[in-house]
Amino acid sequence: MINQEHIGRLGKNLKQILDSEIALGNRVSETSKGWPNSRTVIVFLEKPFLADYPIQGKGIIFREVNDPHYWKSEYYDRINDHVLACKF
């Protein structure tokens, strides 16, 4: 399920990445809120990330998760505790 409120809560840096991915043809497939803690928002993209994004010094961490139970990779906003993840 996609909840527009979840997307609207993303911090500025993750929102910029999301907007870029959508412009490149990726799509939001699902959103989630409240796990692993109450303020966490997760937005899932349908495809793997279509570009690389410079993130140094912006509180964003890129991680290769590569776990089929979860997702392929993510950008994690450690300030807001939000995640932009992509599926395999």
Image (tube, helix red, strand yellow):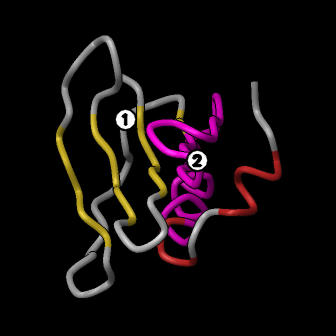
Q: How far apart are marks 1 and 2 (CA)?
A: 26 Å
Q: Which quadrant would the N terminus be assigned to in this image?
A: top right
Give x and y (percent) for residue 60.
31, 70
- The amino acid marked with disc number 1 is Pro
The magenta-colored residue range is 15-43
Residue 61 or 41: which is nearer the viewer?
Answer: 41
Instruction: Residue at 35%, 21% (x, y): give it.
Output: 70
Quadrant housing residue 54: bottom left
Q: What mark, if any, has residue 19 been given in the picture?
A: none
Q: What mark, if any, has residue 48 been given in the picture?
A: 1
Instruction: Residue at 42%, 41% (x, y): give it.
Output: 85
Give x and y (percent) for residue 41.
58, 49
Q: Which quadrant would the C terminus be assigned to in this image?
A: top left
Quadrant housing residue 49: top left
Residue 52 or 36: which is nearer the viewer?
Answer: 36
* 74 lies above or below 80: above
Residue 50 or 45: which is nearer the viewer?
Answer: 45
Instruction: Residue at 45%, 31% (x, y): give it.
Output: 47
- The amino acid marked with disc number 2 is Ser
The reply, left or right, for residue 57 in relation to residue 88 is left
The residue sitting at the bottom extreme is: 57
Q: What mark, if any, has residue 38 been given in the picture?
A: 2
The reply, left or right, for residue 1 in relation to residue 79 is right
Residue 37 in the magenta stretch? The answer is: yes
* 46 lies above or below 33: above
